[in-house]
């Protein structure tokens, strides 16, 4: 069965530090990969997506993610975190037939 | 850009009553809509997928008789929580995609906070 795993439930980083959020998937083929951010009480905002091509994807708000087929991973990175980046981050995968699943989410806390 | 409107944003109802949540695509034809449920501090759980004019496909463990989904037009899908109970209290979010855009369902509603007392 397909699955999406975000191993880190909660991460705390200092403002200005770099950030990496992990995402792994289990699927027989390459799925379509997404990262979303959810601020408290808000809906979801798409940060970036990967369908094919260049495995390093640039998104909004200075985020990027790298698809690594050999590791079935799609980790989200940001070189320098801002206090406003504190939120819940969800990795999601899309499969054929309109199936679309979210990871369990990683809560990011940014300390001054 | 494409907008999905979800209404109401918050609803409080008494146990045993039914609540209807609407999800509208404002500027595109949503051939497929997804309904998710999110528990506090947890991820989104896909409840069902509905294609316009067809019966919804429910995920395993989701009671179809309790969570009625209707997708009668290309711009509107509704989720009705029937005979609501306190354990149904949750955050419900819809997402919509248009024809040929299933790979990029980036149009989400802002969610509905349901509290059952």
Image (tube, helix red, strand yellow):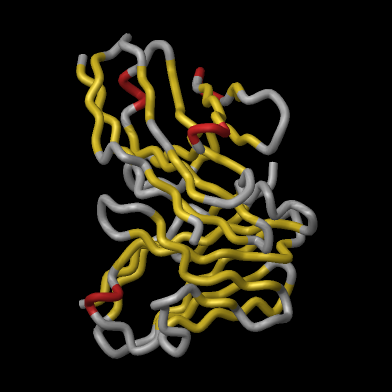
Percent x, y of residue B37: 40, 64
Point 69% across, 55% down: residue: B102
Number of numbered discs visible in the structure rendering? 0
Is residue A56 shown above or below B112?
above
Percent x, y of residue A51: 68, 38
Percent x, y of residue B64: 47, 85
Q: Nearer the viewer, residue A23 or B47?
A: A23
Residue lying farthest to the right in this orientation: B100
Point 79% across, 54% down: residue: B100
Left or right: where does residue B99 sit relative to residue A104?
A: right
Point 47% across, 80% down: residue: B80
Q: On the image, which quarter does residue B98 sit in?
A: bottom right
Q: On the image, which quarter does residue B86 sit in?
A: bottom left
Is residue B90 shown above or below A85?
below
Left or right: where does residue B88 sit relative to residue B29?
A: left
Q: On the image, which quarter does residue B77 sit in?
A: bottom right
Q: Which quadrant of the figure contains the C terminus of chain A?
A: top left
Is residue A71 shown above or below A3?
above
Q: Nearer the viewer, residue B71 or A49?
A: A49
Left or right: where does residue A52 sit relative to residue B89?
A: right
Left or right: where does residue B28 sit relative to residue B38?
A: right
Point 52% across, 71% down: residue: B48
């Amino acid at each position: 069965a397909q699955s999406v795993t975000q191993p880190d439930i909660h991460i705390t980083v200092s403002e200005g530090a770099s950030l990496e959020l992990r995402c792994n998937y289990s699927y027989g083929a390459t799925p379509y990969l997404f990262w979303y951010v959810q601020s408290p009480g808000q809906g979801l905002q798409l940060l970036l997506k990967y369908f094919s091509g260049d495995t390093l994807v640039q998104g909004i708000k200075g985020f990027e993610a790298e698809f690594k087929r050999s590791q079935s991973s799609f980790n989200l990175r940001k070189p320098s975190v801002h206090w406003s980046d504190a939120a819940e981050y969800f990795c999601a995968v899309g499969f054929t037939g309109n199936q679309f699943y979210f990871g369990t989410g990683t809560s990011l806390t940014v300390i001054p | 850009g494409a907008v999905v409107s979800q209404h109401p944003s918050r609803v409080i109802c008494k146990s045993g009553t039914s609540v209807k949540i609407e999800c509208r695509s404002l500027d595109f034809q949503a051939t497929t809509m997804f309904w998710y449920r999110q528990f506090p501090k947890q991820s989104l759980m896909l409840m069902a997928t509905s294609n316009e004019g067809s019966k919804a496909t429910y995920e395993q463990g989701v009671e179809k008789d309790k969570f009625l989904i209707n997708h009668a037009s290309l711009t509107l899908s509704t989720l009705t929580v029937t005979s609501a109970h306190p354990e149904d209290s949750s955050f419900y979010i819809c997402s919509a995609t248009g024809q040929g855009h299933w790979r990029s369902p980036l149009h989400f509603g802002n969610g509905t906070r349901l509290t059952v007392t």
